[in-house]
Image (spheres, helix red, strand yellow):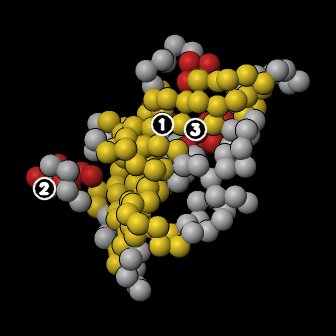
């Protein structure tokens, strides 16, 4: 499999790469009639989403893709409004449970498949029913990864609230 274009995540005023596809959880669990169509081997899912975490809540704020909207129908450009009518500015991702991975720093090892490449660091954000409940930062730059142990967001310190980890 070819390495994939990442989704985007806006978090703490930073624009990060997101190596996870939170929309898949919605598409697999809903009665969505959209069948996304790949236009590139670097984007098998057929779309690219932009996500944001605001007030510890995950939102899908933008979507660009190509999809068939009914069985045998024509393929057309699809945006957030097509998938979520009535939510042009973003939709709360209440369907998502899991860990979001945001690689950071220099590329250490390229892997020609999925999101398997290794970067200096990985920021992992733990999300439950669309709500951010924890985070951890893993340093992949040393021979033995140095794990920053995550903490509950209920125990934020003043330093954390100012944007530090």
Which quadrant of the view contains residue 151? bottom left
Asked if the residues shown at circle 1 and circle 3 are in contact, with their CB atoms under 8 angstroms apart, the answer is yes
The furthest residue to the left: 158
Residue drawn at 20 percent across, 50 percent down: 163
Q: Which comes sooner in the sequence, label 1 or label 2?
A: 1
For label 2, the SS is helix
Circle 1 crowding by C-alpha within 10 Å: few under 14, some 14–19, many from 20:
many
Q: Where 99 sits versus 54, above or below?
A: below
| Residue occupied by mark 3 | 48
Q: Quadrant of the C terminus?
A: bottom left
| Mark 1, residue position | 50
Residue drawn at the location 52% of the way across and 54% of the way down: 19
> Can you see residue 38?
yes
Position of residue 60 measured from the top left corner of the image (x, y, whole percent): 48, 33
Per the model, the C-alpha gap separating discs 1 and 3 is 7 Å
Q: Which mark is residue 159?
A: 2
Residue visible at 59% across and 65% down in the picture:
116
């Amino acid at each position: 499999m070819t390495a994939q274009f990442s989704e985007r995540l806006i978090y703490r005023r930073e624009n990060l790469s997101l190596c996870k596809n939170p929309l898949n959880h919605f598409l697999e669990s809903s009665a969505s009639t959209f069948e996304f169509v790949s236009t590139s081997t670097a984007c098998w899912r057929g779309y690219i989403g932009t996500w944001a975490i605001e007030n510890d809540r995950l939102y899908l704020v933008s979507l660009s893709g190509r999809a068939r909207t009914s069985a045998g129908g024509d393929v057309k450009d699809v945006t957030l409004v097509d998938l979520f009518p009535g939510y042009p500015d973003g939709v709360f991702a209440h369907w998502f449970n899991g860990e979001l991975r945001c690689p950071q720093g220099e590329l250490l090892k390229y892997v020609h498949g999925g999101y398997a490449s290794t970067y200096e660091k990985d920021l992992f954000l733990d999300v439950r029913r669309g709500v951010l409940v924890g985070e951890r930062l893993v340093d992949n730059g040393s021979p033995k990864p140095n794990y920053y142990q995550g903490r509950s967001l209920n125990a934020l310190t003043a330093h954390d609230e100012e944007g530090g980890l």
